[in-house]
Amino acid sequence: MFVILFFCLLFFVQKSRAQIIYDNRVYRPNIKTVEFCNTIKEGAFPIISLNSNDQLLLGFDELGSNTRTYNYTVEHCDAEWNPSRISPTEYLQSFNEDRIMDYRYSVSTIQKYVHYELKLPNRNIAPKIPGNYLLKVYENGDANNPIITRRFYVVSPRANVAAQIIPSNDVALRQTNQKINLQVNFNGMVVQNPYGDIRIVIMQNGRSETALLNTRPTFIRGASLEYSDLNINDFAGGNEYRHVDTRSLRLNSEHTARIFRDTANAVLLLADRSRDQDNYLSVYDNNGGFYVRNQEGSDPVVDADYAQVYFNIGIPGSTVDNTVYVVGKFNDYVLDQRSKMNFDAAKGRYFFNTLLKQGIVDYQYVLVDKAGKPDYTTLEGNHFETENDYQVLVYYRQPGARWEELVGYLLLNTTKR
């Protein structure tokens, strides 16, 4: 009887543990406002140069007043985010695991929380080789019990990258799409097989679901590879993001209908509508990101409060066959139950609410059909003029090596051609 009970308990514990996903994910609903960026600029792409003074800052909140023991480690991955299957001693200079020691309690907030911070690299955890890395944060030293995973990049610049943004070569898409043509120069590098040794990834606004992998150059000219085929690296321009402004919970912002403050904070937003028929309108946004701010406080990291924010959008001809989600960097653009809107057939509207920390939060609506295919442009519009960032990452596998290195990086912006 005892043996049966033991195995049942073991099975339950294993089932309750989250499967680690090699992408940006939050595994517990009480973990909020995960920020991970280069310390040079708030919200910057999480990339650092190897053996430099660059650092990354991870910050997150846990709702409640209790502190916990959180450990972390990092793992080296290839260009497609598969584990490199090499020993930590080959990609880490020091220890394999460390503990997050920096935390603070919220101050004068209705919603109590504990804010944790971590800087990488540090004297305990530092990468030895360039490439893709996955940061894993977990509780009580149990790596199979994750709370957060985050992607970051360590580059050793050896390849020169040049690129330009042009309208799509497809005439039907010239008013909506942004095409990236690029050239990579690898002088000084031993590239025996350009079709196998070099791989290039391009992302829009740092979003993993937009990543396009380039493995075959269009032209090879000496030590230079050109990627300009008519059918590659063609991105939908999309539209500028919508945003929520809760820097003040006393005064309504331009998109706020009403604010309630009692035992909790609640923010009702004005009704949104589909923008697919609108002409392009230049509006400043943060390309999907968010910034924690509190106009009534002095240190928003710990005195910015949380509010339940209520979204709603009306879509002509809506049916239960379509599902709508609200996504942004605030929820890692994940389409799941935590970002899914509820459909009110009587009102023909979709409703959604989520807990957000005070500040400015970009968001967009995503339409998903019965087959589960996401559509990012039908509700938001699609324009070539849209301001977007593009990250170009160049990966190189040395002859005989067992891992890929990140040897080139370029940040492009559509307004700075």
Image (cartoon, rainbow, N blue to C red):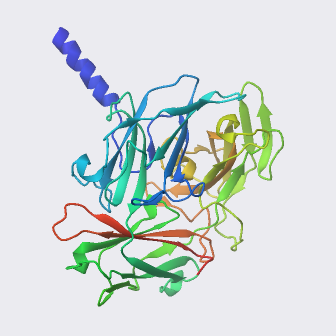
In the image, residue 66 sits, relative to residue 44, either above or below, namely above
Total labels: the figure holds 0
In the image, residue 123 sits, relative to residue 204, either above or below, namely above
Task: Give residue 138's quadrant in the image.
Answer: top left
Of the pair 20 and 134, the residue shown nearer to us: 134
Where's the N terminus, which quadrant?
top left
Where's the C terminus, which quadrant?
bottom right
Task: Give residue 371's quadrant in the image.
Answer: bottom left
Q: Residue at x 48, y 57 (%)?
A: 54
In the rendered image, the residue lying farthest to the bottom is 221
Query: Residue 105: percent from the left, percent from the top?
Result: 61, 28
Say whether residue 222 is left or right of residue 297: left
| Residue 266 seen in render | yes
Query: Residue 238: percent from the left, percent from the top?
Result: 58, 68
Task: Give residue 149's quadrant in the image.
Answer: top left
In the image, residue 225 sits, relative to residue 4, either above or below, namely below
Of the pair 43 and 4, the residue shown nearer to us: 43
In the rendered image, the residue lying farthest to the top is 1
In the rendered image, the residue lying farthest to the right is 251
Say whether residue 25 is left or right of residue 417: left
Query: Residue 23: percent from the left, percent from the top?
Result: 40, 51
Of the pair 373 and 143, the residue shown nearer to us: 143
| Residue 325 seen in render | no
Q: Residue at x 55, y 32 (%)?
A: 103
Say whether residue 48 is left or right of residue 308: left
